[in-house]
Image (tube, rainbow, N blue to C red):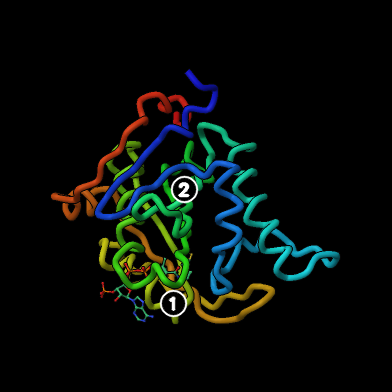
């Protein structure tokens, strides 16, 4: 068995397949990374790099950090999103306090040509089934600027409820950030009939203690 069984995890729903990102995938993801995806502000841009080179570096470092710092009680897993076996985007699932609160957060993007076809909803549905259905998460949370209609629509379609909307500032933007949450009981009531297939999880159980 591989020393990193997460690489064999597969999630499918609708037309979408999710696979943990490999280093080979990163070159493709770099080429697709859209300018409107706001990267994790914990990564400072380096003044020695162009804006574009910083974005590509942060994409890679964030995926590598997720693997390198993995602990069963605090983890981050990045998936490629594929349609007809072609990579079209990235879906991240993270649980920085998994050992304490059993709560997952998520972030995602699609290349612009792949948007508006339901894939954004499908990929989030897939990770919700993984987290709430299979890993026993207590809740899923997410956040988006109040003008990010597609992201907020994906959340509301899948049953997340608005918790609050608060003023927020990053290095690039000030505005209102909307926080949403889907708890396990609500998910269980709504997710009947969701058709998500997951393979390879048994070999990873110790990764999510
Ligand atoms: C967020 C994102 C992944 C959603 O993917 P998507 O393919 O657009 O999502 P879907 O096709 O499943 O659409 C979801 C909903 O948003 C709506 N929507 C999509 N694009 C829209 C737009 N430009 N304006 C208004 N509504 C829009 C859809 O109609 C759908 O709503 P409905 O269920 O009422 O029909 C994608 O838009 C994206 O990559 N955005 C840029 C990065 C980003 O902001 N990521 C989220 C923050 S981490």
Q: Nearer the viewer, residue 46 or 113?
A: 113
Q: Tell me which corner region of the image, top left, top right, bottom left or bottom right, holds residue 179.
A: bottom left
**Quarter, ligand 1:** bottom left
Q: Tell me which corner region of the image, top left, top right, bottom left or bottom right, holds residue 34.
A: bottom right
The outermost residue toward the top is 1
In the picture, measured across the screen, residue 155 lies left or right of residue 34, that is left
- How far is disc 2 from disc 1 in space, using C-alphas? 22 Å
Question: Which labelled disc corresponds to residue 148?
Answer: 1
User: N-terminal of the two: label 2 or label 1?
Assistant: 2
Q: Residue at x 41, y 57 (%)?
A: 141
Q: Nearer the viewer, residue 84 or 72?
A: 84
Asked whether mark 1 lies closer than 8 Å to ligand 1, one says yes
Q: Quadrant of the C terminus?
A: top left
Q: Residue at x 42, y 54 (%)?
A: 86
Question: Which labelled disc corresponds to residue 188?
Answer: none
**Mark closer to the observer (2, 1):** 2
- Kindly indicate whether the residue at mark 1 contacts the one at mark 2 (C-beta within 8 angstroms): no
Q: Secondary structure at mark 1?
A: loop
Question: Which labelled disc corresponds to residue 79?
Answer: 2
Q: Residue at x 44, y 75 (%)?
A: 165
Q: Tell me which corner region of the image, top left, top right, bottom left or bottom right, holds residue 68.
A: top right
In the picture, measured across the screen, residue 54 lies left or right of residue 106, that is right
Image spot of residue 160 (x, y percent): 31, 62
Q: Nearer the viewer, residue 137 or 27?
A: 27
Q: Secondary structure at mark 2?
A: strand
Image spot of residue 121 (x, y percent): 31, 62
- Near mark 2 (Cα within 10 A), the count class, few <14, some 14-19 or many ≥20, is many
- Near mark 1 (Cα within 10 A), the count class, few <14, some 14-19 or many ≥20, is few
Position of residue 79 relative to residue 179, above or below, is: above
In the picture, measured across the screen, residue 145 lies left or right of residue 203, that is right
Image spot of residue 40 (x, y percent): 61, 61
């Amino acid at each position: 068995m591989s020393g990193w069984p997460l690489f064999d995890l597969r999630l499918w729903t609708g037309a979408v397949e999710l696979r943990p990102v490999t280093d080979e995938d990163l070159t493709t993801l770099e080429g697709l990374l859209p300018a409107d995806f706001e990267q994790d502000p914990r990564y400072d841009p380096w003044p020695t790099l162009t804006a574009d080179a910083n974005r590509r570096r942060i994409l890679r470092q964030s995926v590598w950090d997720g693997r390198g710092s993995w602990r069963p009680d605090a983890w981050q897993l990045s998936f490629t999103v594929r349609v007809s076996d072609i990579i079209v985007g990235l879906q991240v699932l993270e649980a920085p306090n998994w050992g304490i609160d059993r709560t997952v957060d998520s972030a995602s993007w699609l290349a612009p040509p792949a948007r508006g076809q339901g894939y954004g909803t499908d990929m989030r549905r897939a990770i919700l089934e993984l987290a709430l259905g299979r890993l026993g998460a207590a809740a899923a949370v997410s956040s988006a600027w109040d003008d990010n209609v597609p992201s907020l629509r994906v959340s509301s379609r899948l049953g997340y409820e608005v918790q609050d909307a608060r003023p927020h500032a990053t290095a690039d933007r000030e505005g209102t950030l909307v926080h949403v949450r889907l708890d396990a009981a609500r998910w269980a009531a709504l997710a009947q009939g969701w058709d998500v297939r997951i393979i390879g999880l048994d070999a990873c159980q110790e990764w999510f203690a």
